[in-house]
Amino acid sequence: MMRIGHGFDAHRLVPDRPLVMGGVTIPYDLGLLGHSDADVLLHAVCDAILGALGLGDIGRYFPDADPVYKGIDSMLLLEHVIGMAQTRGFRVSNLDTTIVAQRPKLAPYVAQMITNLATACGTPIGVINVKATTTEQLGYTGRGEGISAHAVVLMSSIEK
């Protein structure tokens, strides 16, 4: 059995926060505002997996009103979501993601993001794809006000 899920997340860029995407801390003068580390890429991936499994969204399991998740590393959230999928008999077969950011340039960090995602998902690197694009200075991302991410995942049942 196969299932497809889509995830999306967006966060505002603010001073005095680290910029974390795909589990990589990226040198930049702004970071993403959020209750956790605000890793838009990992949040979109979590939502895609949860969506594929019909389990709602990330806010249901890790609410921003819960102090337990204040500043939490989103890799831990993704690992928990992967555990939920495995418990239900599913694994990630393919993951395609897109980060939408005018700045900073993300190409130097994409390989490490892919490695981090593959490790967390328990998959070969070859089934993970991370792309970065701009909006040609259009909208909130183009004005440098925020960053967003999309993720599409194919989940397959685990053969027993």
Image (cartoon, rainbow, N blue to C red):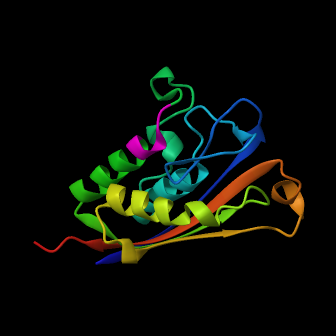
Residue located 86% across and 60% down the image: 142
Q: Quadrant of the C terminus?
A: bottom left
Where residue 149 sits: x, y (%)? 64, 60
Q: Is residue 88 magenta?
A: no
Residue located 49% across and 58% down the image: 45
Where residue 118 sits: x, y (%)? 37, 63
Inspect this view and state whether residue 54 appears: no
Residue located 33% across and 58% down the image: 119
The chief SS type of the magenta part is helix
Where residue 133 sits: x, y (%)? 72, 70
Q: Which residues are magenta?
A: 72-76
Question: Viewer-proximal residue, 1 or 32?
Answer: 32
In-image side of 16 versus 57 (left or right): right
Total marks in image: 0
In-image side of 135 versus 21 (left or right): right
Residue located 41% across and 57% down the image: 116
Question: Viewer-proximal residue, 92 or 13?
Answer: 13
Q: Quadrant of the N terminus?
A: bottom left
In-image side of 141 versus 91 (left or right): right
Where residue 13 sits: x, y (%)? 76, 42
